[in-house]
Image: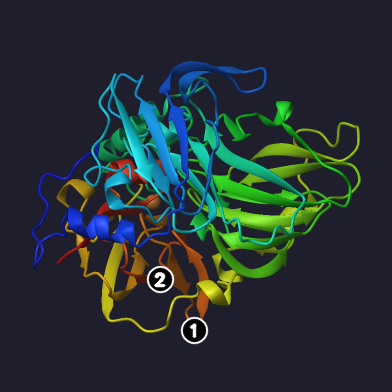
Amino acid sequence: MACSRSTTASAPGGSVGPEAITSAEASRPHTGRTVTARLVPGATDIDLGGTRARTLAYNNQVPGPLIRANVGDEIAVTVDNALDHPTSLHWHGIALRNDMDGADPASPNIVAGSSSTYRFSSPYPGTYWAHPHTGLDTDYGLYVPVIIDDPAEPGRYDAEWIVMLDDWTSGVGSSPQQIFDGLRSMGMGSGSMPGMPGMGDMRSMPGMTGVGTSDLLGGDAGDVNYPYYLINGRIPAAASTFSAKPGQRIRIRIINAAADTAFRVALAGHRMTVTHSDGFPVVPTEVDAVLLGMGERYDVIVTAGDGVFPLVASAEGKNAVARALLATTAGAGPGADYRPPELSRLVGTVDTFTAAPEVQLPAGSDLGLAARLSGTMMHYDWMINGRPYDQSVPLTVRQGQHATLTFTNETMMWHPMHLHGHTFQVIREDGSPGPRKDTVIVKPMQTVAVKLVADNPGIWMLHCHNGYHMDAGMMTTLDYVG
Ligand SMILES: [Cu+2]
């Protein structure tokens, strides 16, 4: 497992110190209010809706409890580690102080049986989530939604629905670790197999029967077929119901917490207006469905119709769905395998959206950074710039620089690339601004450029948010140097 990097290449000028992190924190807004929470990750039994799973969870529930605060509040979350191994809590998407990021080496892991408190404030509102940055733990059910509110934001909606998507095997099929070991050994042991990338061996392993393809993802949709796909911890046959009144405007905050599954999400009988990508506002855009890779979030607004409507998350290329129900009247709605026609109409992707003018980053940059993505299913050796994480050479930036980071995917698999501590702006091929994001899908053989402003000093992970690719080594860091 690619848990640690043995050597950190010393960058010219050296790394920035704690005073730079303290100084950046002083420049964030602070309300003087503190929001506290306690999370206990541990082994437990979870009811997925008539199906029980022995797994890992926060406070014995999947998803774990919502953490919610205003911009500038001090968020103080104590983690009591009841696991039998070290853990951490990473605040995905939040531009927080580096020493609270919940990813080693910026912040130390919490050893088994001990407690630690994360204290930070978020400078930006939005839809975020939190999960460990240790091994494959997120895929066992360790994740919570995190919502940061802006009290000044006009409330143009009547109700709010938080929707967390997941692919599920823990306690009902092979464990995530068994699947990872299978992918690695299949890869390592089949180097002499000609032709197809090791798929022959894979098809004989549980959970790894040939995943299909996706036009939206540019080819292979993933590496693993899961026994279940969940919305808010429930299987489709026991879907949770969100109740509202006809005509209400509902803000749906969709979060993809899966390890290896992109979802195409639609609400039967409704169009949706996408208002935010990865927490940041976009020019409001109407679509029938939206595509989310692992780690991505979209906020949408719908005007509720009269009836019972399935919200369906189709597991891209995997011939299965997750679902929940929106109910504004009594009734049961369509069956558990119903696929609304909206799924095959206009699907919003990263190419569809443009950052709202007030959050667009200034044009131009004074630094080019490159992340070349490589690896094959045959060897299961996912890397950035030709190196797995334990041999990686950091990308470096100086505070204040405006950098263009270019992802070049040299593989036949798509990768949702995530940078900690920053929200970059996607730059379209014609140079025009795309959405602000912290996680962007890079399709096979595609190049994607993003712009970032170096305003948050520290050591920040840059990695693929496919849990298995990341664990195999598709991770490096962006280090601030003085
Ligand atoms: Cu990947």
Identify the residue position indicated by label 1 in the image: 430
Query: Mark 1 falls on what kind of element?
Result: loop
Indicate left or right for 164 with 120 as reference: right
Front-lying residue, 310 or 357? 357
**Looking at the image, is 349 positioned above or below residue 89?**
below
Three-letter code for the amino acid on which mark 2 is drawn: Val
Q: Which residue occupies 22% across, 50% down?
A: 388
Identify the residue position indicated by label 2 in the image: 450
Q: What numbered label is drawn on residue 11?
A: none
Q: Which residue occupies 41% across, 45% down?
A: 91
Indicate left or right for 286 with 10 as reference: right
Rendering quarter of residue 394: bottom left
Q: Which residue occupies 51% across, 20% down?
A: 60
Q: Quadrant of the C terminus?
A: bottom left
Front-lying residue, 369 or 183? 369
Query: Mark 2 falls on what kind of element?
Result: strand
**Looking at the image, is 47 positioned above or below residue 293?**
above
**Looking at the image, is 275 positioned above or below residue 391?**
below
Three-letter code for the amino acid on which mark 1 is drawn: Asp
Disc 1 residue crowd, few under 14, some 14–19, many 20+, Cα 10 Å? few
Front-lying residue, 280 or 298? 280
Q: CA distance from mark 1 to mark 2?
A: 13 Å
